Amino acid sequence: MLNITQKLPHALLNWYDKNARPLPWRADRLPYHVWLSEIMLQQTGVETVIGYYRRFLEEVPSIEVLAETDEQRLLKLWEGLGYYSRALNLKKTAGLIVREHGGRFPDTYDQLIKLPGIGPYTAGAIASICFEEKVPAVDGNVVRVISRVAGIYESISPSVLKKTIAESLTLIYPQKRRGDFTQSLMELGATVCLPRGNPKCGICPIEDLCKANKDNMIAHCPPKQERKAKKQQDISVFILICDRLLAVRRRKKEGLLGGMWEFPNIAEKLDSSQAMELAAQWNTKPASIIKSDDKIHLFTHIQWNMTCYSIVCHAKPNAFTWLSLSSLTESFALPTAFRMFLTA
């Protein structure tokens, strides 16, 4: 167990009362709202999520509506947030909650963790914030805060570190305001106890409780994890145009960008003549070609090095779906990796 002082909850709750950001999902403690916000906030910044969160709730105000929402409409609402499997898991989980729990969220961590798409962090957040259960929610912000408070200087595997922090925090959770304590830890990590080079120790409410601060080790804590280099993949993208319509196709549900729409593409770098040859093999009767500037798109574990060709065609083979630009942008979920070529 880590050495975390019992003074931490009192100090953080006092600070949180005065400094908590008025985020829309904090206006109430409805499990649906907390769940939606936490899923959106995975890999996405708060400022970006606020707009998406509000727009999503306007159209999908309840878990019952979510369970019935068309999958493609859901992906369109999620367009631009990335990690689209999150949206599909939302619908899957909503359906399960409606069918098996009468539309009411399970109210314990042990029940929540069994739901698809809900891991230890999200289950902890819902259980503590909505139901005042004595269970932490350990994300990257909380790892950083507690690593510094406890003075963790040696590299530990991320899964072991999170488990150790969760077990240690459970021992000091307050009897009251457990949800607020959970959020105060997140808030401190998001606004004050920032990553290397940027921590605001001078305004930190627990500066005197922080071992890394006393040891002058803030810059080295938490210890850096060795990151694997992203896999490089060449992608040639085709914007096929015929009678003012664009060719798109839907990706397989499994894997990267599962279920999303995309422009035809191939996982290799083609020159213009090769691109025209492939377009001809697709029976589009290509007439002219323009190459766009190459672009890079980053995913968590892979980098797409993208070349794009706009090709005017004289035929519309049924292998593709042909849409007007307005229909594509208004009604179909097109990932950023492909959407960025529409403005190139």
Image (tube, grey):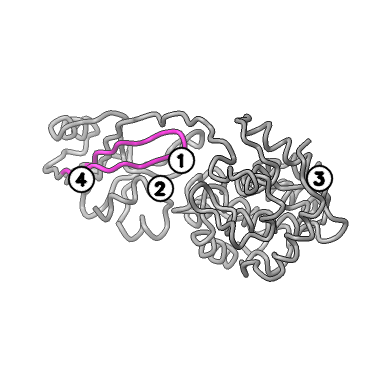
Residue type, mark 2 in image: Pro
Q: Which residue is mark 1?
A: 257
Mark 2: secondary structure: loop
Q: Which residue is mark 2?
A: 335
Lateral position of residue 216 relative to residue 161, left or right: left
Q: Mark 1 or mark 4: which comes first in sequence?
A: 1
Lateral position of residue 186 relative to residue 232, left or right: right
Q: How many marks?
A: 4
Q: Mark 2 or mark 3: which comes first in sequence?
A: 3
Question: Of discs 2 and 3, which sits in the foreground?
Answer: 3
Distance between the alpha carbons at the discs numbered 4 and 2: 18 Å
Residue type, mark 1 in image: Leu
Distance between the alpha carbons at the discs numbered 4 and 3: 53 Å
Labelled pair 4, 2 in contact (Cβ < 8 Å):
no
Q: Mark 1 or mark 3: which comes first in sequence?
A: 3
Distance between the alpha carbons at the discs numbered 1 and 3: 37 Å
Labelled pair 1, 3 in contact (Cβ < 8 Å):
no
Say if 177 sits above or below 344 in the image. below
Residue type, mark 4 in image: Asp
Q: Which residue is mark 3?
A: 170
